[in-house]
Amino acid sequence: MTITETTTETSYADLEQAHTSGVYSKRPLTIVRGAGATLYDEAGRAYLDCGAGIGVANIGHCHPAVVAAITAQAATLTICQEAFHNDQRALLQAELAAVLPAGMERIFLCNSGTEAVEAAIKFARLATGRPGIIAAMRGFHGRTFGALSATWEAHYREPFAPLVPEFSHIPYNNLARLESAITPATAAVLLEVVQGEGGVRPGEAEFLRGAQRLCRERGILLILDEVQTGFGRTGKMFACEHFALEPDLLCLAKALGGGLPMGAVGIGRRIGELSVGSHGSTFGGNPLACAAARTSLQVLQDEHLAEQAAEKGAWLLARLRAIRSPRIREVRGLGLMIGIELKEKVAPYLQTLQNEHGIIALNAGTTVLRLLPPLVIGWDELERLALALEAGLG
Ligand SMILES: *Cc1c(COP(=O)(O)O)cnc(C)c1O
């Protein structure tokens, strides 16, 4: 029996349930196609995607320019180890450097957000010769051991103890606590600009600017994790631009690859030369992902998607803040990264949005409804989303 025969008899959902690892909680929906801000299930039903593959599809699903770039590059060269130079990698690094904060001329390429954070932690230890990393409560940085050690939430961490030593956590937006956590062993402070998984909690200017000032004064490094906030999501190309921050290391992934797996670390001036062999990745900087990322960056700029995210996000935030409901605790956000904190569990609302309104949204923790729509979402689609949320929550 061939696979095709199997799948005609058994649903894809059943097949996955039989063979998936079990580490994901799954919704009973099989997505097979996407275009712009729309996803389609196997029966052809359309869904407005307000999750974007968890903040990946900023330029929309299957953007024609990215499809063309990937198709051409797939027929040219998909893999080229970093021992050699490559045209697509060279151009991507130059094009990224042109949009990164001032002085960030060097870029390490990898394949995911957690890898970007791992690299930044290693670079910080290498550059300072010190082990300590201060991260924030409610922070999320990934699930490999270094990144996991910086991640706050107990259910991600506790089953895997002991984690990497010398990590500590301070309350987010609390500068006094950050200052008192600094020790002679501190290498770096690692923060999100808007905490994503932790409930869509924007950083305050005073805290973020103050953290940068403290880092400079004490000779420690500032690592910003913009894996979720990068590439237009918050209304600027990078969220650190809202506060004129110049991090020493900037972690990127999610939307970077235009839908393909890719991560990167921007490396600032205060990081000295990194020694040959100190870090690396087989797939990092592969020409296929680089071609996709170059095109995605071009689309973000050509279509002014950061500006669009600012405008659309402000509109949606105002609309959602106007909902008078005893069920809503707070509406927070920056650009098209929006969280609605409920006084109850969010799962039933996500199900209603999906089943009754054909809208896919995300959670952040158990009580926050998180919206990360593609930045290309149309005004008519935003209106549909606002109406559905007003009906569901109002
Ligand atoms: C998603 C995320 C990560 C981890 O990225 P993966 O690609 O899933 O490893 C790290 N940091 C932040 C802020 C994220 O949102």
Image (spheres, grey):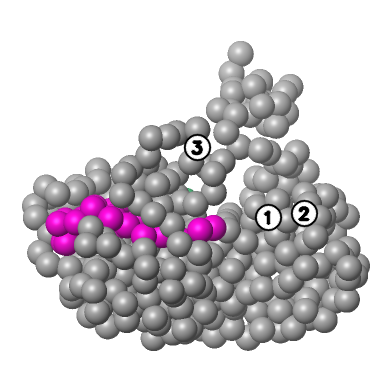
Residue at 52 percent across and 79 percent down: it is 204
Image quarter of residue 244:
bottom left
Q: Residue furthest front?
A: 180
The stretch of residues the image draws in magenta is: 117-138
The answer to whether 76 appears left or right of 316 in the picture is: left
Q: Amino acid at mark 2?
A: Val
Q: Amino acid at mark 3?
A: Glu
Give the total number of marks visible in the rendering: 3
Along the viewing direction, whichever of 227 and 188 lies nearer the viewer: 188
The answer to whether 14 appears left or right of 137 in the picture is: right
Along the viewing direction, whichever of 341 and 38 lies nearer the viewer: 341
Along the viewing direction, whichever of 374 and 154 lies nearer the viewer: 154
Along the viewing direction, whichever of 234 and 198 lies nearer the viewer: 198
Q: Confirm whether residue 342 shows in the render.
A: yes
Q: Secondary structure at mark 2?
A: loop
Cα distance between the residues tagged 1 and 2: 7 Å
Mark 2 lies on residue = 346
In this picture, is 43 found above or below 184? above
Near mark 1 (Cα within 10 A), the count class, few <14, some 14-19 or many ≥20, is many
Near mark 3 (Cα within 10 A), the count class, few <14, some 14-19 or many ≥20, is few
Mark 3 lies on residue = 158
Q: Secondary structure at mark 1?
A: strand
Q: Amino acid at mark 1?
A: Asn
Residue at 81 percent across and 67 percent down: it is 328
What is the x, y in percent for residue 128? 16, 61
The first of marks 1 and 3 along the sequence is 3
Residues at circles 1 and 2 in contact by the CB criterion of under 8 Å = yes
What is the x, y in percent for residue 270? 18, 73
Residues at circles 1 and 3 in contact by the CB criterion of under 8 Å = no
Mark 1 lies on residue = 363
Residue at 63 percent across and 74 percent down: it is 333
